[in-house]
């Protein structure tokens, strides 16, 4: 049986963690991105379907391909971020289920059901995007997730010739905490939850 | 600047954490559920929109209301779980934006745009559901998330008279690790990610 994480870990993951928009000039290595993926991919998905597909946009050339599709408010900070992850989802994810969920014919749950495919891929890739955010924080990075961009444009530019669609973006790096404003308010427990 | 969490914390959150189906006879208190919500609600959402709405189903009476809407494979384990969280999303979330994102008129981004409302609520409530899973693990609980249930039925039973829709379910409690089977395989880094 497990106990609560220590205060410093809870702080790093949630309590003091903030969305960052200004980045220190410190690179994010291949090794660290690989470690984060190896951690986040262990998070649960329905029938182990793992629909997320991620492009880590890091080079100057790849950032230039991304730039035309960003909303005005997201452009400058994204160009300056060490890495921008494109979190996508593969609408053909169910073709992998004979390998990923081998004890039953889970592929047949999806074949010919485009609405169920879309909903499952979108829900589970969003869960996996959240696992990415928290795995990155767990490894000492800061995050800046964004949904203000041209999804169709990013899909065409980065996922051409596939069945992968863009879901959201997340800048990754080491944030400049001196630039943070006070945290925005949150709903109260009673506004967002109840126990019955 | 932060460093990686220690190995025990990474293990509890991701590396050794597993989806549980068999539960120890140990209750989950109001205090612990409140702590978990206070932690998970700090996770980022777009424009701080916070669309998630959660019902923690714990009493025998409330479990009986949930039972008719569960798929056969999810019924018994859910009836035996100390708590089942219904993770929902409020399609009227944007009415709170003048308070939650006060420096601009973010409400107008959504008014009269039902597709944008649905997509934003579904994506962000899924992110928040993942934050719930990881906050629960961080506080020492085990999770059993599920999407096999009658969404419309749960919505009608638990969210009648509101604009809240059910997204997914998550059993919460202390799992019996002795019943776990080996972890299912995961896609390789190269299958789910690339660095450009």
Image (cartoon, coloured by chain):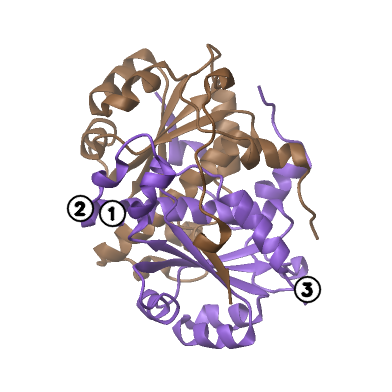
Chain colours: A brown, B purple
Indicate left or right for A109 with A196 as reference. left
Position of residue B125 relative to residue B84, above or below, is: above
Chain containing the residue with disc 1? B
User: Tag on residue B113?
Assistant: 2
Q: Quadrant of the C terminus of chain A?
A: bottom right
Looking at the picture, how far across and down is residue A12, in whole percent? 66, 35
Instruction: Tell which tag, 2 or 3, sits nearer the viewer.
Output: 2
* Dot 2: chain letter: B
Q: Residue at x 33, y 35 (%)?
A: B104
Element class at badge 2: loop
Q: Residue at x 23, y 39 (%)?
A: A161
Q: How many marks?
A: 3
Whole-percent x and y of residue B48?
Answer: 43, 43
Circles 2 and 1 in contact, beta carbons < 8 Å = yes
Q: How far apart, in angstroms, are the residues tagged by discs 2 and 3?
A: 45 Å
Q: Residue furthest top?
A: A25
Give the residue pinned by disc 3: B26
Q: CA distance from mark 1 to mark 3?
A: 39 Å
Circle 3 chain: B
Label of residue B117 in the image: 1
Task: Give the residue drawn at x 38%, y 65%.
Answer: A107
């Amino acid at each position: 049986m497990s106990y609560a994480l220590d205060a410093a870990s809870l702080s790093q993951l949630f309590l003091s963690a903030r969305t960052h928009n200004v980045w220190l000039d410190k690179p994010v290595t291949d090794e660290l991105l690989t470690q984060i993926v190896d951690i986040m991919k262990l998070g649960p998905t329905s029938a182990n379907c793992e629909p997320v597909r991620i492009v880590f946009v890091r080079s100057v050339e790849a950032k230039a391909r991304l730039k035309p599709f960003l909303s005005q408010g997201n452009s400058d900070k994204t160009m300056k971020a060490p890495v921008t992850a494109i979190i996508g989802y593969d609408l053909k994810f169910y073709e992998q289920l004979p390998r990923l969920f081998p004890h039953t014919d889970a592929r047949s749950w999806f074949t010919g059901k485009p609405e169920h495919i879309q909903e499952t891929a979108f829900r589970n890739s969003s869960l996996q995007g959240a696992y990415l955010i928290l795995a990155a924080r767990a490894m000492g990075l800061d995050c800046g997730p964004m949904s203000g961009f041209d999804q169709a444009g990013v899909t065409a530019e980065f996922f051409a010739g596939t069945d992968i669609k863009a879901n959201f973006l997340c800048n990754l790096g080491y944030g400049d905490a001196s630039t943070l404003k006070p945290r925005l308010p949150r709903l109260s427990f009673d506004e967002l939850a109840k126990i019955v």
